């Protein structure tokens, strides 16, 4: 049986990968993917903490919050991809540095 440390270490690895995508990458698609990875890391740690709060008891509130969070993250991702598609059609690039230069 897995322990809480196993799930939290997996969530930490996901969090580090997501943070790396947000900090190091300049492509907007990769930024959206990094944001999704961060949200999944938070959901995993939330479920892990709620499962190991009491032995033999699974908190349904935490599962409900995570399901709602997943639905919201999916809709935000869909909206972000629509914005990315429109930005690419208009400016022919998805590089953050080039899009910031266009603002001036």
Image: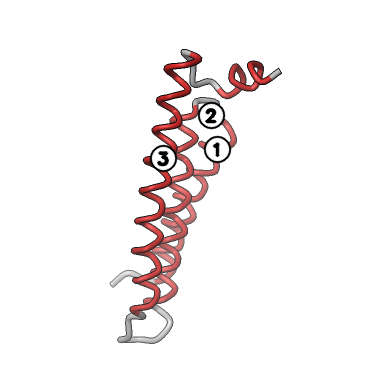
Q: Which residue is mark 1?
A: 22
Furthest residue toward top: 92
Q: Residue at x 55, y 38 (%)?
A: 22
104 in relation to 67, above or below: above
Marks 1, 3: nearer the viewer: 3
63 in relation to 102, above or below: below
Marks 3, 2: nearer the viewer: 3
Q: What whole-number distance in Å separates the C-alpha atoms at marks 3 and 2?
A: 20 Å
- N-terminal of the pair, mark 3 or mark 2, is 2
- N-terminal of the pair, mark 1 or mark 3, is 1
Q: Quadrant of the C terminus?
A: top right
Residue 49 horizontal/vertical position (percent): 44, 73
Of residues 65 and 46, the one nearer the viewer is: 65
Q: What whole-number distance in Å separates the C-alpha atoms at marks 1 and 3?
A: 18 Å
Report the disc number at residue 6.
none
23 in relation to 66, above or below: above
Q: Which residue is mark 3?
A: 79
Furthest residue toward right: 104
Q: Which residue is mark 2?
A: 25
């Amino acid at each position: 049986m897995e322990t809480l440390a196993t799930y939290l270490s997996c969530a930490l690895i996901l969090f580090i990968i997501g943070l790396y995508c947000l900090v190091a990458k300049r492509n907007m698609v990769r930024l959206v993917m990094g944001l999704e990875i961060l949200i999944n890391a938070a959901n995993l740690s939330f479920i892990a903490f709620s499962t190991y709060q009491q032995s033999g008891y699974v908190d349904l509130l935490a599962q409900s919050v995570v399901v709602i969070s997943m639905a919201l993250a999916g809709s935000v991702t869909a909206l972000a991809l629509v914005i990315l598609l429109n930005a690419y059609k208009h400016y022919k690039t998805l590089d953050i540095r080039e899009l910031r230069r266009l603002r001036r």
